[in-house]
Image: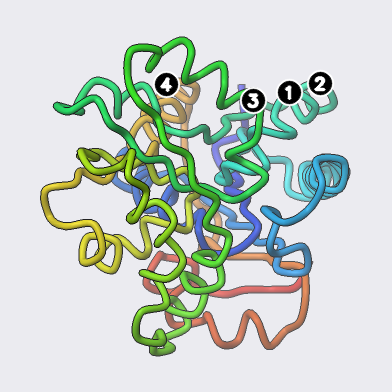
Amino acid sequence: MAEPSAPILVFDSGVGGLTILAEGRKTLPQAPVIYAADFAGLPYGTKSEAEVAARVCGLLGRMAERYQPRLICIACNTASTIALSMVRDVLEVPIVGTVPAIKPAALVTQTGVIGLLGTGATVRQPYVDRLEAEFAADKRLIRHASDALVPLAEAKMRGETLAEGAVADAVAGLRDDPQAQDLDTLVLACTHFPLLADELRAVFGEHVQLVDGSQGIARRIASLTQGQDFAREGSDFAVATGSAESLTTLTPMLERHGLMHAAQF
């Protein structure tokens, strides 16, 4: 049984994992949390599978040793679809991954036409092929690599004004695809993308449902920690690779998520 003060470690390449943290707070508000962002490795979606796997396994190994978490959530679709099984092989702590929400999307679509926005690395993964075959074989799933949305989400969280049309340009390939004419459901297969929900609704229309896996992940974390005691010995905080400047500009946003200080890792 974990010590009551043992944290849940939420890991992402940047700030996208805060969408998972926000859902987790609703389910387990009493749980101590460390949020870890790999700004030095951002973006993951344009890297090779070997690069992502080596980086994620190495970082999480060191973080697990330093912080002794009771559970690690890889709040990144790209890292999860590539490295989840490898991380589970090398660490004894329970690991919860983040995978594209194809199953719930298939349950809610009325037209049977589903779009999937993810990074280039995510949309090409065999794991996504398996999810499609298992849960959406009788649907039309249209994948679109939208790596440009990641820096836009990061910029928005820093309080920057996005260039007019930037989000629309990043998803134009899906919006304008003739096969997507009857699209009514959109899977946000990157934890950064819910941060741009308003902008995506403006592009695709209010009739298109946006689906992500954050609620299911929060339920999974709650299930794996059921019956455990929680006790904070201090404030929740964030750690990050990369420059101190990256953390400084995000301080107000981190505080809004209950992360009261931040440090370089």
* Residue picked out by circle 4: 223
Q: Earlier in the sequence, mark 3 or mark 2?
A: 2
At horizontal 48% and vertical 58% (from top left) the residue drawn is 192
Q: Is residue 64 above or below residue 18?
A: above
C-alpha distance separating marks 2 and 1:
6 Å
Which mark is in front, 2 or 4? 2
Residue 265, relative to residue 218: is it above or below?
Answer: below
The residue under the point 57% across, 41% down is: 77
Residue under pointer 1 = 85
User: Sequence-wise, which precedes: disc 2 or disc 4?
Assistant: 2
Amino acid type, mark 3 = Pro
SS label for mark 2: helix
Indicate the position of residue 102 as horizontal and vertical percent values.
39, 27
| Residue 209 at x, y percent in the picture | 20, 43
Mark 3–mark 4 Cα distance, whole angstroms, equals 11 Å
Q: Sequence-wise, which precedes: disc 1 or disc 3? A: 1
Q: Which amino acid does label 4 sit on?
A: Ser
> At label 1, which amino acid type do we have?
Ser
Q: Callout 3: helix, strand or loop?
A: loop
Write down the quadrant of residue 68 in the picture. Answer: top right
- Mark before the other along the chain sequence, 4 or 1: 1
Viewer-nearest of labels 2 and 1? 1
